[in-house]
Amino acid sequence: MRKKILLTITLLALIGVAVLTYRTLTYNTRMDKLGYELMQKIDSHKEKTGFLPKDLSEIGIDVDDECYHYKGGIFYYTILNDSVYCLEYPLDAENNRGITSDNRIWTENYVI
């Protein structure tokens, strides 16, 4: 009986880890895709005007307290210089994922 309970608890723990891993991977994949869409919009704006947008509201993205809402995702936009910008999205209260327009590689716990 004791082995059955231990086996059940172990199995439930493994299922929980699998579900959390799956949710994390699908969240990151979805947010990365949305980030690339935003980058296309930003790059298109720069090609048309010669300048990066001062904020993403210039390209039609909703803004609320320095964060931008795009298709259900929350992003932060920072201009680093005249041609390079950074996009970030939160993973949780302490961690984020970010990308710059010059390297275009998503990085965990990105720091500008």
Image (spheres, rainbow, N blue to C red):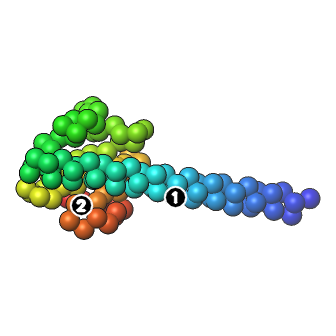
Considering the numbered disc 2 on the image, is that residue within a helix, a strand or a loop? strand
Q: Position of residue 111 (x, y in %)?
A: 24, 59
**On the rendered structure, is 52 left or right of 63?**
left
Q: Position of residue 36 (x, y in %)?
A: 34, 55
Residue 15 position by quadrant: bottom right
Q: Position of residue 22 (x, y in %)?
A: 58, 57
Residue at 52% across, 58% down: 25
**On the rendered structure, is 8 left or right of 19?**
right
Residue closer to the observer: 44 or 79: 44
Q: Residues within 10 Å of mark 2 (few under 14, many from 20)?
A: many
Residue closer to the observer: 59 or 16: 59
The residue carrying mark 1 is 25
Residue at 81% across, 62% down: 7
Q: What's the mark number on residue 100?
A: 2
Q: CA distance from mark 2 to mark 1?
A: 21 Å
Q: Position of residue 20 (x, y in %)?
A: 58, 54
Residue closer to the observer: 54 or 107: 54
Q: What's the mark number on residue 90?
A: none
Residue 2 position by quadrant: bottom right
On-image quarter of the C terminus? bottom left
Residue at 21% across, 53% down: 43
